[in-house]
Image (tube, rainbow, N blue to C red):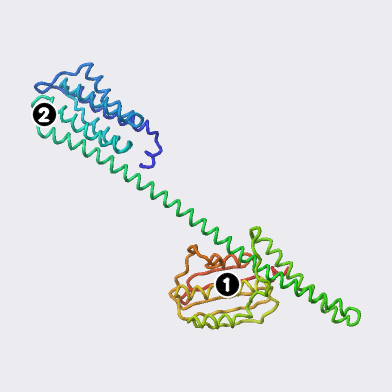
């Protein structure tokens, strides 16, 4: 219902309120069978004053000061006529509307003016009407209506502020997530560049060897050409992946030294154990020809997962499992903690590449599968599967 009212034209809402108040006064004009001592019968002037009392409800948004002045003046004139219909309801509604829709100074002035006017209006009535109960009810009615409008105004302001904060926070989270993805892709691009540069160095050396021995040792030259073919195919595959990664213009190149891979896990395990985390490394299957990009990304995922175990205090030990198959390489890192995952959208940081977003991006570059969540035996499990057959085409 609140949503339906919020979608209605404000002028229509005010018109309905003014009509209802006027209808209640009209019902009192028509339905009263007898008059109290001192009250006057309804006249054309009474009807006109009733219109002037109710009409400002319709115009209060655009002309608040004039609307209050017309309404209160008409009430005073109406009170001198000692008519039967009670005009206080229009003052109540107008005070509610002014407190809800108008600036603070005008609302406070309206409250004080209404308190004075309705007191004068009651005082002008015959003795049987101007009793203490009428005074108290009329003054309390003005005050309650004004406070209700003021409270609703403040609630709307707080709600609007909370909504704006929520929208800003959502935009900030989305921007942070986009920034994390962009930073991770830039990092991947630099590291894949290292792989390509290393492959080109191998090709250069093998081509020099082949050129040197092609006349005297054809078998060795063929071997060099075969190595060049294999290395160039791998380099072309990595280059295609590299072209799919966003990279800003002018981004500085990474080091030209060969990037780390799964063969360097022993050194990584030693570094992690020095930080207080016990690590067991299990290898299943026979290692075959793993493309350099996958070798690097798998190493980085293991490194990141172990770093998160240390950072989040997920446990005192972790187990790393590497499964080699002819068509895939799968790495799993399981800790012995309570299974609470790091945040999906990491907090702002200075070192790009941290968090689940970074690991997921690394696997997505090669069309693999990634998962991170509570393990079947407790703790937290990070799993990444890289398809080798698809990459090697």
Instruction: Using the rendered view, name the quadrant where residue 238 is placed.
Output: bottom right
Labels 1 and 2: the sequence-earlier one: 2
Q: Position of residue 385 (x, y in %)?
A: 60, 71
The residue sitting at 29% across, 37% down in the picture is: 105
Instruction: Using the rendered view, name the quadrant where residue 259 is placed.
Output: bottom right
The residue lying toward the viewer, choosing from 339 and 263, is 263
The residue sitting at 57% across, 61% down in the picture is: 181
Secondary-structure class at tag 2: loop
Q: Position of residue 192 (x, y in %)?
A: 67, 68
In the image: residue 272, left or right of residue 298: left
Residue furthest top in the image: 44
Q: CA distance from mark 1 to mark 2?
A: 85 Å
In the image: residue 283, left or right of residue 119: right
Q: Position of residue 300 (x, y in %)?
A: 59, 73
The circle on residue 151 is none
The circle on residue 130 is 2
The residue lying toward the viewer, choosing from 27 and 223, is 223
């Amino acid at each position: 219902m609140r949503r339906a009212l919020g979608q209605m034209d404000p002028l229509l809402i005010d018109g309905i309120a003014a009509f209802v108040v006027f209808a209640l006064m009209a019902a009192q004009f028509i339905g009263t069978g007898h008059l109290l001592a001192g009250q006057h019968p309804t006249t054309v002037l009474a009807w006109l004053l009733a219109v002037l009392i109710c009409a400002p409800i319709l115009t209060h948004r655009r002309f608040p000061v004039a609307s209050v002045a017309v309404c209160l003046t008409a009430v005073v004139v109406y009170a001198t006529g000692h008519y039967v219909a009670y005009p206080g309801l229009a003052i109540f509604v107008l005070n509610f509307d002014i407190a809800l829709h108008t600036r603070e100074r005008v609302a406070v002035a309206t409250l004080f003016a209404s308190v004075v006017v309705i007191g004068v209006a009651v005082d002008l009535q015959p003795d049987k009407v101007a009793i203490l109960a009428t005074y108290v009810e009329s003054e309390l009615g003005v005050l309650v209506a004004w406070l209700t409008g003021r409270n609703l105004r403040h609630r709307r302001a707080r709600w609007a502020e909370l909504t704006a904060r929520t929208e800003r926070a959502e935009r900030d989270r989305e921007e942070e997530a986009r920034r994390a993805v962009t930073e991770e892709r830039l990092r991947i691009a630099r590291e894949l560049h290292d792989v390509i540069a290393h492959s080109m160095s191998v090709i250069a050396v093998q081509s020099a060897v082949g050129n040197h021995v092609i006349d005297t040792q054809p078998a060795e030259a063929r071997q060099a050409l075969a190595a060049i073919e294999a290395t160039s195919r791998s380099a072309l595959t990595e280059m295609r992946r590299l072209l799919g990664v966003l990279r800003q213009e002018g981004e500085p190149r990474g080091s030209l030294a060969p990037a780390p891979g799964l063969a360097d896990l022993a050194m990584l395990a030693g570094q992690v154990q020095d930080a207080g985390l016990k690590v067991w490394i299990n290898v299943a299957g026979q290692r075959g020809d793993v493309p350099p990009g996958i070798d690097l990304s798998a190493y980085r995922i293991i490194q990141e997962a172990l770093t998160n175990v240390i950072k989040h205090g997920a446990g005192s030990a972790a187990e790393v499992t590497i499964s080699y198959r002819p068509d895939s390489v799968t790495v799993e890192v399981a800790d012995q903690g309570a299974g609470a995952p790091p945040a999906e959208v990491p907090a702002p940081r200075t070192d790009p590449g941290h968090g689940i977003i970074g690991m997921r991006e690394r696997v997505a570059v090669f069309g693999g599968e990634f998962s991170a969540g509570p393990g079947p035996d407790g703790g937290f499990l990070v799993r990444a599967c890289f398809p080798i057959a698809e990459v090697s085409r």
